[in-house]
Image (spheres, grey):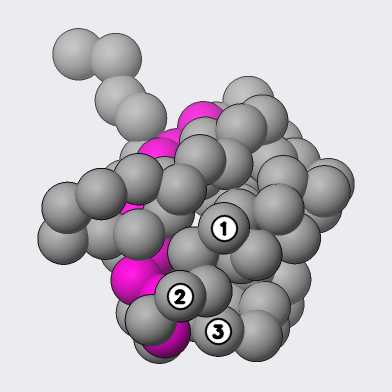
Amino acid sequence: MVQAYILIQTEVGRASTVADVIAKLPGVIQAEDVTGPYDVIVRAQADTVDELGRMVVAKVQQVEGITRTLTCPVVHL
C-alpha cells in the first residue's frame, strides 16, 4: 500500500467545496481545507505508485476549482 499527501491550490473561495468533493473519492483517507500556501491537503492511498498517479490525474485533478496539485508520497526510511 502506498500513501501520499496531495497539496492542492484552488480558485479563490473554492477550497471547502473542493475538499468535500475529494473526500468522497475512492482511495482518499482524509481531505481538509487549510490556510497557507495550499488550500486543501489530502491523504490518499493506493496499491501501487502507478495507481496513485492515475488516481491523482484521472480523479483529483479533474475536480472543478483546482488550479495546481503537488503529490508527496509517504516514505519510511
- Where disc 3 sits, the SS reads loop
**Residue 21 is drawn in which quadrant?**
bottom right
- Which image quarter: residue 61? bottom right
Q: Is residue 51 visible?
A: no
Q: How far is mark 1 from mark 3, CA to CA?
A: 10 Å
Other residues around mark 2 within 10 Å, as few (<14) / some (14–19) / many (≥20): few
- Circle 2/circle 3 CB separation < 8 Å: no
User: Which numbered marker is on residue 13?
Assistant: 2
| Measured Cα–Cα span from mark 1 to mark 2 | 8 Å
Viewer-nearest of discs 2 and 3: 2
Please name the predominant secondary structure of the magenta segment in the image: strand
Q: Secondary structure at mark 1?
A: helix
**Label 1 belongs to which residue?**
16
Report x, y in % for residue 60.
63, 68
* Residue in front for this viewpoint, 40 or 54: 40
Q: Which residues are magenta?
A: 3-11
Q: Is residue 47 left or right of residue 39?
A: right
Q: Is 33 left, or right, of 47 in this rendering? A: left
Q: Secondary structure at mark 2?
A: loop
Identity of the residue drawn at 65% across and 85% down: 64
Total of numbered circles in the picture? 3
Give the alpha-carbon distance from disc 2 to disc 3, as whole Å: 9 Å
Numbered tag placed on residue 6 in the rendering: none
**Which residue sits furthest front?**
13
The amino acid marked with disc number 1 is Ser
Q: Is residue 44 above or below residue 70?
A: above
* In the image, residue 7 lies in the stretch drawn in magenta: yes
For discs 1 and 3, the disc positioned in front in the rendered view: 1
Q: Which mark is residue 65?
A: 3
Three-letter residue code for mark 3: Gly
Q: Is residue 29 above or below residue 6?
A: above
In the rendering, at what x and y percent does residue 9 appear? 34, 71
